[in-house]
Amino acid sequence: MFFDISLGFGGIIFVAIVLLAMSIRILREYERGVVFQLGRFWGVKGPGLIILIPVLQQMVRVDLRTVVLDVPKQDVISRDNVSVKVNAVLYFRVVDPEKAIIQVANFFEATSQLAQTTLRSVLGKHELDDMLAERERLNIDIQQVLDAQTDAWGIKVANVEIKHVDLDESMIRAIARQAEAERERRAKVIHAEGELQASEKLMQAAQVLGQQPGAMQLRYMQTLANIAGDKSSTIVFPLPIELLTGMAELSRRDAPRT
């Protein structure tokens, strides 16, 4: 009889220890527990030590840290009908554990699939040049669309970064030819602008020299002095008629009178 009583008492203690172990939960600082009582939502607990009612209450752990999600490469057709492969990286975190557990079956998988479809949808509205040169703006557009759609799940999309835009070889060659043509166009425009500025300065110089006949003669003499050291055997140099007339008058004055 004593043995039966001690055995029964020991069984009660064992069951009590098991129930106590089942009721104790410890949540880290970055964790929260969504507690259900008889299948109904009861509350969000944590962090720290949590006591549950065995059998009646169950808890689902939720990590509140930022999750880095790698969005696989997606086939995107741009607005100018160019096919490219684009992948990205997504940063999100749970801000409402209740919604993340109750409103969606698997918030991680749901966010991943939504990111893939949104990436194709948003980039398909832009041209290839925007994908290559306006990534910062496209990142913001994708982040805003994702954040608006995941808000009902208690998810906050903090940032989206487009990693790579892969083109086929023919498109790479076409872009290289376009860049080369653009450089040639800029070079021709700069050369034409230089010619225009030089012609304007020459016109101004001609007007100044035309107002002073003596200045024109000095310019001719300076040019003659500059080419005097040239090795060419024959130099054809035009002289203004005013200079010849002046020299003839000086010759007549200096000639002896008879």
Image: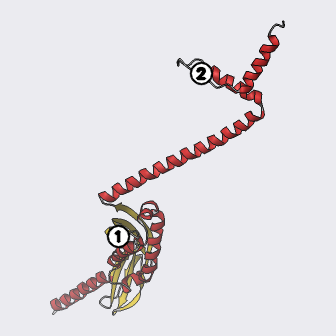
The first of marks 1 and 2 along the sequence is: 1
Say what amino acid the circle numbered 2 marks.
Answer: Ile
Q: Secondary structure at mark 2?
A: loop
Mark sitting on residue 46: none
Question: Is 31 drawn above or below residue 239 in the view shown?
Answer: below
* Spot occupied by residue 56 in the image (x, y as percentages of width and height): 32, 91
| Residue at (39, 72) in percent of width and height | 124
Which image quarter is the N terminus in?
bottom left
SS state under label 1: strand
Rendered-image quadrant of the C terminus: top right
User: In terms of depth relative to the viewer, which is nearer, 194 or 155?
Assistant: 194
Q: Which residue is mark 1?
A: 76
x and y percent of residue 204 in the render? Answer: 70, 39
Residue named by callout 2: 227
The image shows residue 44 at horizontal and vertical percentages of: 42, 83
Residue with the most extreme right position = 257
